[in-house]
Amino acid sequence: MNEKERVESLNQLQARLEFFRDLGVEFLVSPRKKAEKSQPAEAENPLLIAGSFSGSPASADGEEWERLIRKIMSCQACPLFKGRTQAVPGEGNRQARLMFVGEAPGRDEDLQGRPFVGRAGQLLTKIIQAMGFSRDEVYIANVIKCRPPDNRTPRPDEVKACSPYLLRQIELIRPRVIVSLGKVATDFLLQSPKSMSELRGNFGEFQGIPVMPTFHPSYLVRNEGNKEIKKMVWEDMKKVLKLLES
């Protein structure tokens, strides 16, 4: 590594530490460390659970996932398919205890076929890392699998047409906790008349699964200079960690 590369690496590290500081992170620790002390040796990764929601063998789950992904990629259930580059099913650990659900793909996601890869996605990745996890240890998906024109808010008919895919993903994963990112995901999962500001930071429930509503990362990007919003999101994530550790 030459001098220029070392300087760039140090600058990147400094930027990441400053981001964690703005969140209000006092220390970084994976909840896995605590879990290893109290769980049996065979349960080394607390994000993995044995079997599936239905109790089917892993191979059967794999076949079900492949069928589901094929359906999503070829879906024409609503007009959004006409404008997509490709659908964005979701990605991550299909046996994750922690699941993040957002609204819909944006331009970058539509091009790459992966959820949360733009600026908001980079921010979400940092939050996940601050929690002590990597992206491939959690599962990340959206309510809508195709990009709405100009990144507009999905319409109710689009949500209705696309939601069976997310419902099946949740059923297959059966996460311990779901984090709903923004109003669209929160409204879909909690079906509450309350505003996002009223719901944020308080656990709700979806089919017996705790749901933590928090601000969408894009909202943090639009309010980049507001450290209080970042701290609010981090307080929400600390509650999620506490529940995962229990």
Image (spheres, rainbow, N blue to C red):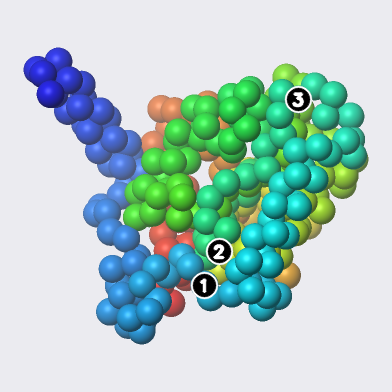
The residue most toward the top is 4
Vertical position of residue 227 compared to residue 39: above or below: above
Q: Are marks 2 and 3 in contact (CB under 8 Å)?
A: no
| Earlier sequence position, callout 1 versus callout 2 | 1
Disc on the earlier residue, 3 or 1: 1
Q: Which residue corresponds to the image point at 57% horizontal and 46% vertical from the top-left?
A: 91
Residue 84 disc label = 3
Identify the residue at image location x=89%, y=29%: 79
Residue annotated with mark 2 = 95
**Pointer 2 local density, CA inside 10 Å: few below 14, some 14–19, many at least 20:** many
On residue 49, the disc is 1
The CA distance from mark 2 to mark 3 is: 28 Å
Q: Position of residue 173 (x, y in %)?
A: 62, 63
Instruction: Report if the CB atoms under discs 1 and 2 are less than 8 Å apart.
Output: yes
Cα gap from disc 3 to disc 1, whole angstroms: 34 Å
**Distance in Å between CA atoms under marks 1 and 2:** 6 Å
Q: Is residue 106 visible?
A: no
Mark 1: amino acid: Ile
Q: In this rendering, would 189 be left or right of 93? A: right
Residue 150: quadrant of the picture: top right
Measured from the top left, where is residue 200 in percent x and y?
58, 53
Question: Of label 2 and label 3, which has the lower sequence position?
Answer: 3
Farthest left residue in view: 3
